[in-house]
Amino acid sequence: MGKETQASAMEIDDPKSNASDQIIPKFSINVLQLLKSAQMQHGLRHGDYTRYRRYCTARLRRLYKSLKFTHGRGKYSRRQITESTVAEVRFLHLVLYTAERAWSHAMEKRQLPDGPNARQRIYLIGRLRKAVKWATLFAQLSAIKGDSRTSLEAEAYASFMKGNLLFEQDQNWETALKNFKSARAVYEELGKYGDLENQVLCRERVEELEPSIRYCLHKIGESNLQASELLHIGEMEGPALDLFKAKLEAVMAETRSQQAASMTEFHWLGHRFPISNAKTRVAILKAQELEKDLHGPTADSLPGEKRLAIFDKIFTAYHEARSSIRSDLVSAGSSENVKDDLNGLDKAVSAVLGQRTIERNQLLVSIAKSKLTRQRDDKNEKASRPEELVRLYDLLLQNTADLSDLVSSGRDRKPEEVAFAEDCEMKSLAFRAERCFFLGKSYSLAGMRAEAYTLYCRARSLAENALQKYQATGDGDQTIIKELKTLCEECRSNICIEHATGIMEELKAPENLSKKISDISLTGPDKKLEKFLLEKLENYESAVGDSNVKSVPRIEAFPPAFQAIPRNPIVLDLAYNFIDFPSLENRMKKDKKGFISRLWR
């Protein structure tokens, strides 16, 4: 019996007996969610790849130290990560963040101001190769050590990195397309399962991969994409699209440089100015292409924020052109003809820049007007105030005056310049009428009826004068004519409202005055306390107040007021002062002093 129990104990202690019965644990990593949260929290929300690369480096340092997987002390001795090494999930994190660090370093080089030069591009491609190497290792280890979902996400991540490398190399478009499609197929399947957040992330990644796939098809020749459609795709946002945007920008810059070779003159108000500098040509051509988006057939469908972004790009392009022109002026020397042409070109570009500035401010006015009538919009932004519109019209008046002065300068003025200056004067008159109207609106909101009435009358006279001038020309801007007619009607209605309100307030003034005098007390003003919400539940009144008025909500008193509560009685010992206690001096310990201490007394 003892031998049997000993034999069974040996079987239990022997590791070889149950090695085949052990289940190897499978690690689980939500790769897309992990990377997306890290990217959004550490720089890629704003396209800062340097910050994200530094985060990956710091994260790797912490992982190496916590896993005690450092590469020697003093002398570097590399330690490979193999299947036997991966004892916990953090080893997979090591491989993943190493791939992310290499990819972010490549994207950092791609986002240099003037683009990567030949040497930097070689380094960039080397970093992408390193990212592909570590992503492939991550996929291999996840296939062995990870669960099925982790393995699928790792395969999609490796395919995405391989596609990025081939995309940057401008070769093997079929292989790049195959990798992008493989990643898209995996994310489409993963987007059907899991929690809601993961499904949303998978769908976003599918949308980010779509432009790269369409561009690969375009390069192969299996797609009929136009340049405008490519630009529309490039307006999408996401870290996965940054490489596509850089590639698209490089292609568009090359196309512009080819088109700029045939652009030799700049036409403005009957003048023709020669353009000799290639940088000036490219900058002006870029601005003109962006202007087509603003004035094209699809311009009305663009949201205000996107149109403002286009205006910013136009301003940047024209400022680049002006800086190139002025640098040419410095190096022109003593050639008067060249200087005259460059000065004329600078004046023309500055005038076009002034026109676009006026158009941008008019767009801001239309946005502010749309927010003026509503309390709050969908993004919880505050409603516009009339003072903001007054400030915008001040800017428009200043811009119009500057543009008129610029066009009027010069000796030999052509009929086009004279007509343009007259148009600026009529626009200035219309802007003055609008400014006067909104200034009257601000006075009306402040309760100043006489001032508001006077300003509305002045705005109406200015609007009628501007309307007569526009109608006299015959070919005036119909949009401005329509706005002036609407302004005249609004001025008339507001004049009547202010007149009636002023008469009512004047009639009620004695009554209000007597009421205020009757409420005066010698003890001081009695402040009327409004009731809280819980005290007036039977009344249908708002306890929060109007959204435009800054008032404290009166829902409940906080902190609550003090209340009297019963407490324990206070016991006073009155007999303590009348008790004579016995003397304890005979029990006190007396200090014994020696002979030497007596001498020093």
Image: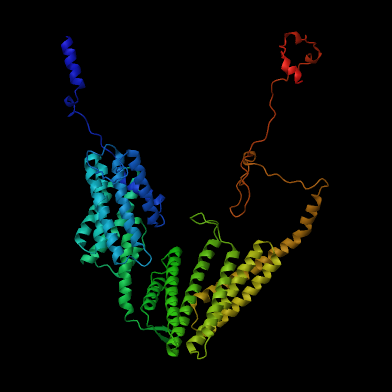
Can residue 237 be seen in this snapshot?
yes
Please tell me which residue is depicted at 58% across the width and 53% down the height of the picture: 547
Res. 328 image quadrant: bottom left
Viewer-proximal residue among 354 and 557: 354
Between 360 and 242, the one lying in front of the other is 242
Work out whether residue 484 can be spotted: no
- For the C terminus, the image quarter is top right
Left/right placement of residue 269 relative to residue 161 reads right
Q: Nearer the viewer, residue 30 or 72?
A: 72
Question: Can you name the residue that lies furthest to the right here?
Answer: 522
Place of residue 186 in the rendered image (x, y in percent of width and height, measured from the top left): 25, 49
Measured as percent of width and height from the top left, residue 261 is found at 32, 80
Q: Position of residue 275 (x, y in %)?
A: 38, 83
Residue drawn at 59 percent across, 76 percent down: 463
Rendered view: 172 above or below 579: below
Q: Position of residue 179 (x, y in %)?
A: 22, 55
Q: Determine whether 428 is above or below 36 in the image.
A: below
Q: Quadrant of the N terminus?
A: top left
Q: Nearer the viewer, residue 578 or 180?
A: 578
- Residue in view at x 63 percent, y 38 percent: 559
